[in-house]
Amino acid sequence: MNSNSDASMTTSNDSHNYRTAFIVLTSLFFMWGFITVLNGILIPFLKKVFELNRYQSMFVQFTFFGAYFVGSVIYFIISVLWGDPMSKMGYKNGCIFGLLISAAACAGFYPAAAIREYNLFLAMLFFLGIGFTLLQIAANPYIALLGKPETASSRLNLSQAFNSFGTTVGPVIGGFLVFYFFTKIGSPLLNAAGEPILTDKGLTMTAMSVQLPYLVFAGIFLLLAIIVKMTHLPQFISHEQIEKGIGALRYPHLVLGGIAIFVYVGAEVSIGSLLINFAGEIVKMPEITAKSYLAFYWGGAMIGRFLGAISLGENKNTSSMYIRMLITLLVAYGFIYGIIYFESVQSGEVLGFTSTLPYIIFLAVQYLGFIIGKSHAGRTLGVFALIVIGLLTITTFSSGYVALWSVIAVGLFNSIMWSNIFTLAIKDLGQHTSQGSSLLVMMILGGAIVPLVQGRVADMMGGYQMSFFIPIVCYVYLAFYGLKGHAVKSINSGD
C-alpha cells in the first residue's frame, strides 16, 4: 500500500499528520476497551436482576461478540461480491460510521433498563458490537499503516495499551458506579418475590445504575465522531485495482491467524467475564472488592502492551530498551494500584499494598518473558502462551488466593497477543489487507463462543475452577501459532 495525502497535504508534513491520526485513533481504542470491559460488570448485575444461571449470564458476551462475527461476515461478503468497502469509503468514514452506531446502542440501554427486558439489553449489546466491528476493521490496519511496516507491531501494541488503559479503569469506575454510587439514585429493583435486589454488600440495585453511565458513553461516542470528522487524517490508497473474490484466504498465515484470534479473544473474554463471580466462589469476595482484582487482570494487559511497544519498536539498543521497559513497568503498576487504592478508599473496601505482592512477582515473570522473546513478535507470543498455560494449570488445581492471583496474572501475558497476532497475520497481504482485517475481526466470534462453552462446563461441574481447561486448550494453539504457525509462505498470484 502507498500513502497518498489529501490535496491540502504535502509530503513534508506526513509525520505530523501521522502523529495526529495516531492520537485520534488511539482515543477510539481507549473507548472501545472501556466499554467492552464493562460487560464484566454487567454480567453480575444482570445475573442478579434477571436471576440467571452461569450459562444464561454468558449470553451477554455471546451476543456482544457474536455481533463481531455477523458484522464481519457481512463485510466479507460485500468485499467478495463488490470489492473491499474500506478501500472505497476510507478508514476515516468507517470509524465515523462505527462511532455513530455505538452511540445509538449505548443510548438504547436506557429503555432496556426502564422496562427491565433482558432481550432488549442483549439487542443493544449486539448493535454496540456491530459498531465496534467497523471500528476494529478500520482502526487496526490503519494504525499498522501509519509508519514503517517493521514497527507495525510496536504501534499497534501502543494503541492497544491505551485500549487496555480503558479496560483497566473500566472495572474500577464501572463497578463503583453500578454497585455503589448509583445504588443511591432511583427506585430499588425488585425480584420475583417483590423484595429489593441487593449487591453483595447489601446495597439496593437500581435501573439508574446502568442507565446514566451508558447515556454518558453515548454522548462521548457522538463527540468522538465529530472530532474524527473534523480532524484532517492521511489517506491510504492502493494503486492496484480493487479485486473481488476471496484473495485473502490464499494466505495460510492469515487463516491460521484467524483461528489464533478466535481462541485468544475467546479465552481472554471468558476469563475476564467470570472473574468477579469466580472470586466470590473461591474466596467469598463481594463484587465491590472483586472489581478491583478485575482491574488488575485488564491492567496487566495495559502494562504488557506498553512494554511490547518498546520491545518491538525501532530502538534496538538492548540495555537502553530494557531499562525503559523496567521504568515503564514500575510506573504503570503504580498508576494501576493508585487508581484502585483511591477508589477503594471511597467505597470503604481498601486494598492494601501487601495484598498485591503476588502480582508484583508475576510482573517480574512478564519482564523475563519479554527478555526471552528477544523483541520478536512470534517468539514473544509463543513464550507468553506457554506461561499462561502454566498459570491456568495452577488456577485449576490450587485453591484460595493462589488460584485467584494465578488467573489474574493471565492478563499480563494476554497483553501483546492481539497486536502480535494481528500484525503477523496481515503481513504481506498487500491489497487484501482490509479483507484480511475483516476476516480477523470476524474471528472475534471466539469472545461469544468460548465464554458460553466455559459457562456451560462450569454449570456441569458445579463451579468455575475445573472449567479452566477450556482456555488452556486455547493457549496451546496460541503457543503453536507464535512459535511456528505465523510463518509467511509463498502463494500463487491468482485468486
Image: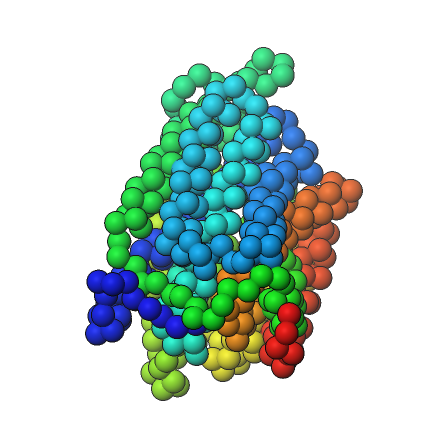
Residue at 30 percent across and 59 percent down: it is 233
Side of 85 relative to 480 (left or right): left
Height in image: 43 above or below 329? above
Seen in the image, is 186 located left or right of residue 247? Answer: left
Task: Tell me if 297 is positioned left or right of 66 in this view.
Answer: left
Coordinates of residue 278 in the picture (x, y in percent): 61, 45
| The N terminus: image quadrant | bottom left
- Residue shown at 31%/56% (left/top)? 24
Q: Is residue 184 visible?
A: yes
Where's residue 61, x and y in %? Answer: 59, 43
| Residue 94 as seen in the image, left or right of residue 413 | left
Instruction: Give the color scheme: rainbow, by chain, secondary structure or one colour.
Output: rainbow
Which residue is located at x 31 percent, y 63 percent?
A: 234
Q: Residue furthest right?
A: 460
Image coordinates of residue 461 in percent, x first then y, are: 77, 45
Write the residue at 57% across / 52% down: 78
Image-quadrant location for residue 334: bottom left
